Image (cartoon, helix red, strand yellow):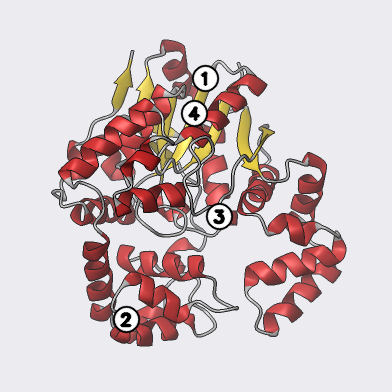
Amino acid sequence: MAVLGIVAEYDPFHNGHFYHLGEAKRLVQPEAVLVALSACFKQRGDLALLSPYERAACAVSAGADAVFALPVLWTVRDAEHYALGAVSLLAGLGVTHLAFGAETPDSEALSRLADLLENPCPGFTADLKDRLAGGIGYPAALAAAADRILPGAGALLSAPNNTLAVCYLRAIRRLMVPVVPVMVPRRGEYHAHRVDPEFPSASALRAALYRGNYSAAYSAVPPESESRLKARFLSGEVPDPAVFDAVLLSSLRALPPEAFRDLPDAAGGLGDALCKARIAARSARELTGMLTSRRYPASRITRLCAHALLGVTQKQLMGLPCPSAALLLALRKNASLTASWRKTPVRVCPDPVAWRPEASAADLTAWRLWAQCCGLPDTLPFTEKTVAVP
């Protein structure tokens, strides 16, 4: 049977996500839709607004059949490894099609670029090394080197959804899984500052909510998402930026200097720079601003800080096996769907307690940090239950 897979953050689930999910289902006509969801931390290293269970409930309400948590060691990664972990998880669960957005849904152009990056020619590799040696950041160097081989590739990689699309295509090739890519044209502006009710930017939505501009924010989300956002903001059970600042800075200042060199992606003096900046910075935003440069984009800094908080090292990520277990967050009851998981290589865990032996220490730390920043008890990973929908 056709099983559609989607990789998402849904932070929060908004009308653009609703459109993407519906359009993907229209194109594939699947018998089931599975979602791999970033749990408490997101790909760039910041905290999610709502709990994984609440965002999963919104996805099921909008038409997904099952939602699984992507382990944090695969979530807080560069786009290439984030896509690799998510595609591996979904393919292991039996997905036959993978739908993703792209600003330029040109399957041929994106496929050629994926082929180049996955099997680079000597000229591309040499050019990339030269650009990196010249002090250019990796994303910019990659785009420029690719553009030299495939004119137009640099423009493709300048758009965030295109970049992820290429990484999904690379993951399918590297894993050699029989998954059909399905590209859905991206609607709306990714970094828009104003809230577009029809195709909003998630970052603009979050900013509006934290400013208290609730009317604009709620006009851009489906009813289930609106209800849950209202409840959490009224109770104050969303991450408090001031608490996160205090937790992050106190944790960084408690680390010995040598620990910064062991962090993932801390080469080139970035770990040492973070070690120095932690003393002067007064907030996570200020810390990121102090270290962001032409060579080090802000996303790399925020991921580095998240890894420090989670106790993740470069050695831990080297040779990390693809996910072999998945925490089930939400499920639309479907006997044939759950029966099919008995034949998959990925173990499906229906609750956090059963998941604990399979989870890394980083996953449990992520849950506790998220709860702490929301003013919730750190036992949250063991009390939240799978959302079941008839």
Sequence-wise, which precedes: disc 3 or disc 4?
4
Kindly report the distance in space between the C-alpha atoms of the residues bearing marks 4 and 1: 7 Å
Kindly report the distance in space between the C-alpha atoms of the residues bearing marks 2 and 4: 41 Å
- Label 3 near label 2: C-beta < 8 Å? no
Badge count:
4
User: What's the residue at 37%, 70% (across, down)?
Assistant: 285
Kindly report the distance in space between the C-alpha atoms of the residues bearing marks 3 and 4: 20 Å
Circle on res. 281: 2
User: What's the residue at 73%, 54% (across, down)?
Assistant: 156
Quadrant the C terminus occupies? top left
The residue pinned by badge 4 equals 34
Q: Position of residue 124 (x, y in %)?
A: 81, 68
- Secondary structure beneath disc 1? strand
The residue pinned by badge 1 equals 32
Kindly report the distance in space between the C-alpha atoms of the residues bearing marks 3 and 1: 26 Å
Q: Position of residue 244 (x, y in %)?
A: 26, 63
The residue pinned by badge 3 equals 81
Q: Can the viewer see residue 345 in this picture?
A: no
- Is 343 situated above or below 288? above
